[in-house]
Amino acid sequence: ITVRTWDVHTEKKHKSVFKPRSNKGKKVIPTCCTYSRDGKLIAAGCQDGTIQIWDRNLSVHTKFHCQQAHAPGSDTSCLCFSYDGVTLASRGGDDTLKIWDIRNFRKPVNEAKGLTNYFSMTDCCFSPDDKLVVTGTSVKKDEGNGKLVFFDRLSFQKVYEIEVTNASVVRCLWHPKLNQIMTGTGNGLARIYYDPVKSHRGAKLCVVKSKRKEKHAEALTQDYVITPHALPMFREARQRSTRKQLEKDRLDPKKSHKPEPPVSGPGRGGRVAAHGGTLSSFIVKNIALDKTDDSNPREAILRHAREASENPYWIAPAYTQTQPEPVFAEESDEDEEADKEPEWKKRKI
């Protein structure tokens, strides 16, 4: 039946022991305890209805002691120091919530009654700006909803209340940095309340995530496969009357246009005759029209001699500096007579 402090680095041995006592010096059972905000004071609520506060370094005698803070025999479920370190809030098992000034610890500064409490760990806490005090209420099964009740710290008037669920609201915590309220209920439900503008991170990180849709395999059987040309917008309209359609086609200049006759002669107007449309027919035609006489091969070769002598291009320019002057044999009468002989008398080589 003690209140002990522990060093997290030496778990096997406690650091200090605080023994709460009654006025008669008897041992009493502490039901809740807490540190002050600066860590210098340790407060404990006991079953005899007292609230006892010790200096952290002096574990023998209490620094502040309040008799009959709550009803004797009830479990004080929570103690909470304000952020300024002067005010103490206590949640009693006698369905009350009280505010104390530790500098004048005889009477409570304010008190709220009628806050049902069936649990020995029902919380109370201050808002981050020290202007509000919040606690939860308990209900029996199927007899209403548990509430989160907010009181003004100075006037201690009920400012607001939230119906959480159809079970007792046991634990509550107002986080100073996130500015969000976490609650735990008797049926195992945990809820977080936040402000869209004033709150930061925390639950807001989960709210922005969209819930994933469950994939059902059965939904695939309900889909229909439709071919594109089976839709009504792609179907061609049926012709109700052939006669009316023919009359419309006669009025259409493209459909009523008379086809042009085939080209019998050479092509004209961008059209090509049937017999001269291919490359092979063009080549055959040119060969047939070619009237060049190649019966005398010497004349056929020498017809380019004049142009070659006047404008030499291939061989003559390469030998202009080293080529001697050509000397040709003079023509004799025998050659002329040989040329005049008929073909059948000429010597065959």
Image: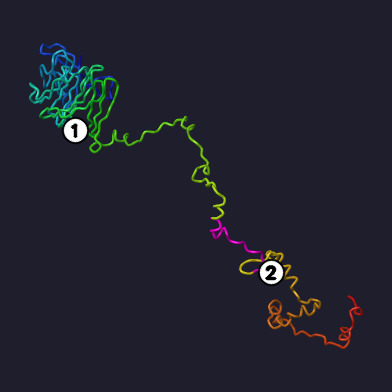
Identify residue for label 2: 265
Q: Position of residue 305 (x, y in %)?
A: 74, 81
On the image, which quarter does residue 349 sit in?
Answer: bottom right
> How many discs mark residues in the rendered view?
2
- Which one is in front, 313 or 336? 336
Q: Does residue 135 show up magenta in the picture?
A: no
In reply to whether residue 254 is colored magenta, the answer given is: yes
* Image coords of residue 7 (percent x, y): 25, 24
Q: Characterize the local packing of mark 1: few (<14), some (14-19) or many (20 or more) Cα atoms within 10 angstroms.
A: some
Q: Earlier in the sequence, mark 1 or mark 2?
A: 1
Which residue in the protein does label 1 denote?
A: 128
Residue type at numbered disc 2: Gly
State whether the magenta stretch is mostly helix, strand or loop.
Answer: loop
Q: Secondary structure at mark 1?
A: loop
The residues bearing labels 1 and 2 have C-alpha atoms spaced at a distance of 106 Å
Please name the residue shown 49% across and 43% down the image. 232
- Which residues lie in the magenta part? 248-267
